[in-house]
Image (cartoon, grey):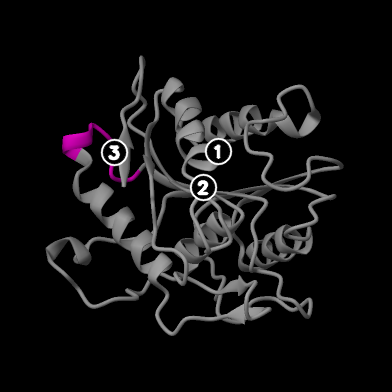
């Protein structure tokens, strides 16, 4: 993981960023360090997670022309371990251990959903750090994938419960890579579980818009996240 300290006024909040990449690769720049550049300017300590890929979670294999589901969810293991590590180093990093959130895009958005709801360890304990909670205190899922399956059903391996943290979701209706049903179905599941959820759906923006469309409505999502973080007392 790469740690980027907060700049200027420090809020005590930290965000762990899970970039996208379809679990075939990890887009560290567009959906990692660029996101952290924005967050650190807002006084947030930012951590980019370079989870294991390919094979860290289910992914589409172009050679075999089919979806591959690994027996061991290495990306989720890495995500849980990263949250625990950051929480264990709260004093050293100058952050509040109860103000640690996750933000993910595309495949990273799926990791956001997984870490928000799968709170039991997915790997054998390594050391005392693994006794620390891996539950994030808030979550931001941008154009998430893998939740709405190929047949239109909700991912049965994702047990959404009231234990999930307050969640912000944003996606564009014209996303041709991860259809809008991912956000709609996840938001509905969170609402049914009684989890505080904010949802923003944009007419245009496509997939992987990240911070690249500042002059379009979809480009306003960072400001919306900032307002939401202030509302829930994290900024």
In the shown orientation, is residue 71 left or right of residue 6? right
Q: Position of residue 116 (x, y in %)?
A: 48, 61
Per the rendered image, the range of residues in magenta is 91-98
Q: Is residue 4 above or below residue 102?
A: above
Report which quarter residue 135 is drawn in: bottom left
Q: Position of residue 230 (x, y in %)?
A: 53, 30
Q: Nearer the viewer, residue 51 or 232?
A: 51
Report which quarter residue 152 is drawn in: bottom right
Residue at the location (50% across, 61% down)? 111
Kindly tell me whether residue 163 is visible in this rendering. Answer: no
Q: Position of residue 76 (x, y in %)?
A: 41, 67
Q: Nearer the viewer, mark 1 or mark 3?
A: 1
Residue at the location (32% across, 41% down)? 2
Q: Which residue is mark 2?
A: 27
Q: Is residue 54 above or below residue 212?
A: below
Pointers 1 and 2 in contact (C-beta within 8 Å): yes
In the shown orientation, is residue 93 left or right of residue 209? left
């Amino acid at each position: 993981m790469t740690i980027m300290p907060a700049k200027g006024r420090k809020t005590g909040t930290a965000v762990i960023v899970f970039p996208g990449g379809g679990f075939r690769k990890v887009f560290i720049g567009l959906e990692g360090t660029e996101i952290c550049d924005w967050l650190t300017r807002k006084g947030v300590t930012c951590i980019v997670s370079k989870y294991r890929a390919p094979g860290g979670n289910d992914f589409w294999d172009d050679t075999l022309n089919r979806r591959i589901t690994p027996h061991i969810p290495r990306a989720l293991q890495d995500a849980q371990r990263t949250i625990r590590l950051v929480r264990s180093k709260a004093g050293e990093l100058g952050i509040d251990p109860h103000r640690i959130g996750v933000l993910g895009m595309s495949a990273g958005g799926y990791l956001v959903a997984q870490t928000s709801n799968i709170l039991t360890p997915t790997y054998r304990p390594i050391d005392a750090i693994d006794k620390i909670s891996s539950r994030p205190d808030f979550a931001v899922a941008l154009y998430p994938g893998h939740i709405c399956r190929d047949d239109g059903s909700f991912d049965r391996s994702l047990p959404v419960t009231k234990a999930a943290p307050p969640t912000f979701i944003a996606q564009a209706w014209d996303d041709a890579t991860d259809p809008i049903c991912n956000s709609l179905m996840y938001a509905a599941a969170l609402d049914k579980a009684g989890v505080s959820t904010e949802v923003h759906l944009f007419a245009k923006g496509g997939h992987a818009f990240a911070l690249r469309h500042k002059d379009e409505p979809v480009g306003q999502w960072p400001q919306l996240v900032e307002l939401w973080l202030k509302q829930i007392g994290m900024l």
